[in-house]
Image (spheres, helix red, strand yellow):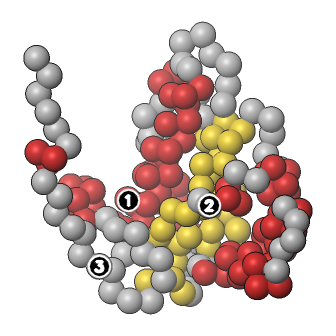
Amino acid sequence: MEALDALLNRVSVPRLTDPAPNAAQREALFQAALRAPDHGQLRPWRFLTVEGAARDKLGELFAAAVANKGDASQAALDKARAMPLRAPLLIVVIARLQDHFKVPKSEQLLAAGCAAHGILIAAHAQGIGAVWRTGDLAFDAHVHQGLGLEANEELIGYLYVGTPVNEPRTAPILETADFVRVWE
């Protein structure tokens, strides 16, 4: 697939099933991530892959986080446990924020977001379905601890990756004039 085609036509694919991307496809996903803009070559990102039985373990971590908030219904706990099972592979994108005299942490956070976007574009280019999810559990201290995040790290999101259940929808065509202005 041509690069411009991938950029113009990528859409989120929330309904995913097996199989997960193979080793060569994963390598392409992560190589694309590593091409993100990176002022200072800090490489302010890291990734965790979660699949197989580890998805159940992540579901238990999510349920514990929900329970820690108090008064969690059984339905809420069951929903939390099922979240990681929505795709055969989850990629947890983590920003590694470093003190740097020239590169503010906000820029490093954006670079990690660009790395996540690179994964999504590379997935689309390979015919792999993917969707970026966050929600409360992306910002939960208990989840961060369970995933091994350090004090200088922030969870950017969970990329759910797999084979699309349905044909991906067509990307809407937006009017650039709605978003672009000339500054004089």
Mark 1 lies on a secondary structure that is helix
Res. 131 in view: yes
* Horizontal relation, residue 124 to residue 59: left or right: left
State the residue lying farthest toward the top. 101
Q: Quadrant of residue 80?
A: bottom right
Residue 30, percent across and down? 53, 54
Residue 29, percent across and down? 48, 59
Q: Quadrant of the C terminus?
A: top left
* Horizontal relation, residue 19 to residue 56: left or right: left
Residue name at image x 43 percent, y 34 percent: 37
Identify which residue, 62 or 115, lies in the foreground.
62
**For residue 121, which numbered disc appears in the image?**
1
Q: Residues within 10 Å of mark 3 (few under 14, many from 20)?
A: few
Disc 2 from disc 1: Cα separation = 22 Å
Name the residue carrying label 2: 135
Residue name at image x 68 percent, y 19 percent: 99
Q: Earlier in the sequence, mark 2 or mark 1?
A: 1
Residue 179, percent across and down? 20, 43
Q: Quadrant of residue 11?
A: bottom left
Disc 3 from disc 1: Cα separation = 15 Å
Q: Amino acid at mark 3?
A: Arg
Q: Amino acid at mark 1?
A: Ile
* Horizontal relation, residue 39 to residue 60: left or right: left
**For residue 147, which numbered disc appears in the image?**
none
Residue name at image x 49 percent, y 36 percent: 110
Disc 3 to disc 1: CB gap under 8 Å: no
Res. 52 in view: no
**For residue 169, which numbered disc appears in the image?**
3
